[in-house]
Image (spheres, rainbow, N blue to C red):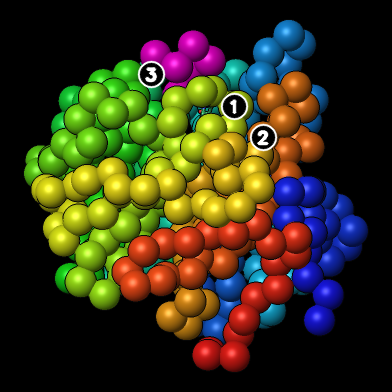
Amino acid sequence: MEGNKNGSMWLDDLGNPIQAHGGMITRFGDLWYWYGEHKGADNCPGTSRVDVIGVSCYTSRDLLTWHYEGLALKADPDHPSSPLHPSQVLERPKVLHCPATGKYVMWFHADSPDYTRAAAGCAVSDTPTGPFTFLHALQPNRFDCRDMTLFQDTEGRAWLVHSGNWNKTLYFSRLTDDYLGFTGEVYPALIDQEREAPALMAWEAKYRCITSGCTGWAPNTALVAQSRFLTCGWKLTDAPCTGPGARQTFGGQSTYIFKIGQVPYLMLDHWNPKSLRDSGYSILRIHMVEGRMEIPWQDTFIPDTSSL
Ligand code: DGJ
């Protein structure tokens, strides 16, 4: 089987570059879905910002051949004050299926070009491909929301996990049972440790959270934190990447962890800040060795679907 070359742009089934940055891969039913930022336009001159286009959705049966389903959430050029207006910033979209309502719920980092809005945007759809309807952009529990992800814990509760307090601290903000708002429960973690790009997984009796440091678009050392509870006890333990290039996370930055069966994989973005549309992707297998994460570089992503 020929895999996709890690660290480069990947093409969809029609030969077009996949535009799904800061994204996630998940499985709904018998299909894999890849959501991410569509950055398929030139950077605005002199900036590392691309006008908001929307959130792409791709589907696949084998995690190698991806079919573009269109924009699951579209920019809103008609309303200048909308967080979805092209002049704004939309990053790191993530989608969960809500068991209580049967809806698909998307949250994303909704910001202004100077990163002072620092909100979490929410949209909802009856189907995984959308179109998602934008509901609101909020500061969770009055904290700023910057890099973020969604996570369903082992008890089925959903959390928005976001860098806040100007990236100093990571916050775990519990979502309501319909996943559309916040319960008011919020737990700070890794206080003053300045981590971003969170990507989580549950493994045996502990949660793991990979984050990057805060160096803008430039790569730095990914670190893993672990805790028995989402709500407390997080400790940064180790750098999980191994081998040449590990100190720079192989030139990438974490965005999501998904599992194929029981096997976890880390998704990375390889940002090209001068031309964000050309930013590449990697998907690296996470090896769990006596409870420790080890992530060596792999030239190609070849999914192991034998356990499905
Ligand atoms: C690093 C973040 O991880 C990206 O998502 C993006 O927000 C850039 N910072 C902006 O500089």
- Between 282 and 147, the one lying in front of the other is 282
Residue at far front of view: 243
Q: Residue at (78%, 37%) from the top-left corner?
A: 278
How busy is the neighbourhood of tag 3: few (under 14 within 10 Å), some, or many (20 plus)? many
Dot 3 amino acid type: Arg
Q: Earlier in the sequence, mark 2 or mark 1?
A: 1
For residue 206: magenta?
no
Residue 139 position within the rendered picture, expressed as x and y whole percent measured from the top left: 27, 28
Say which element carries label 3. loop
Name the residue rendered at 53%, 32% in the picture: 220
Query: Mark 1 or 3 closer to N-term?
Result: 3
Cα gap from disc 1 to disc 3, whole angstroms: 19 Å
Residue at the spot of label 1: 217
Whether tag 2 and tag 1 are in contact, CB under 8 A, the answer is yes
- Write down the residue under mark 3: 117
- Residue 299: image location, x then y, percent: 75, 60
Q: Does the numbered disc 3 mark a residue whose Cβ is under 8 Å from ligand 1? A: no
Instruction: Label 2, secondary structure: give it.
Output: loop
Q: Amino acid at mark 2?
A: Trp
Q: Is mark 1 within 8 Å of ligand 1?
A: yes
